[in-house]
Image (spheres, rainbow, N blue to C red):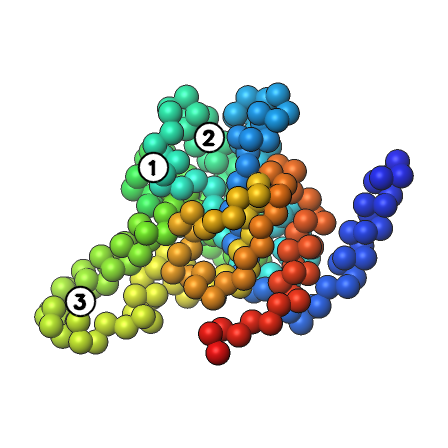
Amino acid sequence: MDLSSLIYGVYERRLAHDLDRTATPRHVGVMLDGNRRWAKANGFDTADGHQAGADKIRDLLAWCEEAGVEVVTLWLLSTDNLDRDASELEPLLRIIERAVSDLAAAHRWRLHPIGALDLLPAHIADALRAAETATQDVAGLTVNVAVGYGGRREIADAVRHLLLDHARAGTSLEDLAATVSVEEIASHLYTRGQPDPDLVIRTSGEQRLGGFLLWQSAKSEFYFCEAYWPDFRKVDFLRALRSYGSRERRFGR
């Protein structure tokens, strides 16, 4: 072991030791950003960058388990990403399919696909649903796999389903307009029944949400990390938890 690795290990253990365990976020959202730029910076093909990013997911989930996180949402593919050239999109979809199937095969995490699955190729959507079915009885960490996901699309889908439910029940538009609530809309989101994200992490240095969990993140804390996703380390995750634990959450009060 070289000196830098030794120093890194000591620093990582110190960070973990000093964390406030009473301030662990229940739900962490992660925007896995920077795969393409990582590939370009390291002289690799774009698909190699996406594969390196997929290979990092298991590490993150293990760190979340160690920290006591209950729910993780991974944004793997946005609705906007579906407009990418087929030469990039098709390999990326295959990588996502393999990654999710491998996570399901581990039978360690409870997988829940979120997004507009109807926009995906049928075999990809089927693989995501199969992963959810295969892990529905797992008692471990809940992992939302956001594929074909967009925050605006999620809200539109929630409102659409709410309207359909009331139409089937015979509710008039006037009655619905008089009674619809924030809570009722939330009950139709992809993440219904789950706590809203306490902490949202975005890698690659970008400092914007880009449509990630727009409704649910209204009171979330945000942490922006300079590292590209494939380079994201446990020490970066621990720094995010440390930053979160140091903040005074007022929830608008």
Q: Is residue 174 left or right of residue 150?
A: left
Reply above or below: 69 against 85. below
Q: Disc 2 residue type?
A: Leu
- The reply to whether discs 1 and 3 touch (Cβ–Cβ < 8 Å) is no
Q: Residue at x 59, y 64 (%)?
A: 25
Residue underneath mark 1? 120
Q: Is residue 235 left or right of residue 141?
A: right
Q: Is residue 127 left or right of residue 166?
A: right
Residue 58: x, y in percent? Answer: 61, 44
Q: Disc 1 residue type?
A: Leu
Q: CA distance from mark 2 to mark 1?
A: 12 Å
Q: Which mark is residue 67?
A: none
Residue underneath mark 3? 166
Residue 213, by quadrant, is bottom left
Q: Is residue 17 left or right of residue 225?
A: right
Residue 103: x, y in percent? Answer: 55, 43
Closer to us: 245 or 128:
245
Q: Disc 3 residue type?
A: His
Residue 250 in view: yes
Q: State the quadrant of the N terminus.
A: top right
